[in-house]
Image (cartoon, grey):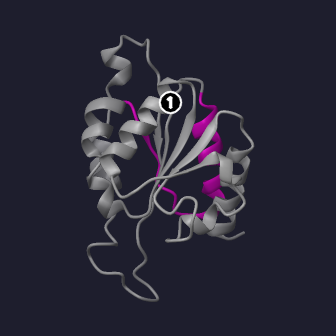
Amino acid sequence: MKYKEEIVRAMNWLSEKEDTVFLGQACKVSGHSISSTITEVPQEKRIELPVFEEMQMGISTGMALEGYVPITMYPRFDFFILPMNQLINHLDKMREMSIGEMEPRVIIRVSVGAKTPIDAGPQHTQNHTDALRKMLTDVNVVELLEPEQVFSAFKEAYEREDCRATLI
């Protein structure tokens, strides 16, 4: 089994769920490695967004509050710094601020850029997983290192009974 094949399998499984929606840059058109993992996801389940990462996280949170399960995709962890306000101060604190009344389930996909066979450079290859684990109190943070972790991580993110958002 290959990592990408497992991502594709997970995205296809998620796309079969009535309440899921996929959003992000190059979501409906090719543009980066994430877009190549959702080619089998029906077009009507995809929402193409411009490059406005903070607003994308806000839209994802709002959609989750309306009963959708957004799979919100960010092609590089380095640029995921931009939606940190929405993630840390809003999505992560929503359950506490609402005394458990609001439980937005959002599945957040981020990628760490490759260093081999070609190094994409320091602006595209940083991994901020450990920092986010220290900053987030309610959002579940999952780092996938092996292909056999992929499908079960996305399945758990969708099915978890506590409705917590998950950053993968």
Q: Name the residue under label 1.
A: 64
Is 140 a magenta residue?
A: yes
* Residue 140 visible in the displayed image: yes
Along the line of sight, which residue is nearer the eye, 160 or 70?
A: 70
Residue found at x 64% / y 33%: 159
Within the image, what quadrant is residue 40 found in?
A: bottom right
Residue found at x 30% / y 80%: 121
- Part of the protein shown in magenta: 138-160
Residue found at x 61% / y 55%: 149
* Residue 164 visible in the displayed image: no
Q: In this view, does 128 lie above or below 166?
A: below
Within the image, what quadrant is residue 3 found in?
A: bottom right
Residue found at x 57% / y 25%: 67
Q: In this view, does 83 lie to the left or right of 101?
A: left
Q: Is residue 163 above or below residue 46?
A: above
Q: Position of residue 156 (x, y in %)?
A: 61, 39
Q: In which quarter of the image is the N terminus?
A: bottom right
Query: For the image shown, how many numbered marks are present on the structure?
Result: 1
Along the line of sight, which residue is nearer the eye, 92 or 1?
A: 92
Is 150 a magenta residue?
A: yes
Residue at the far bottom in the pictured view: 117
**Amino acid found under the numbered disc labelled 1:** Ala
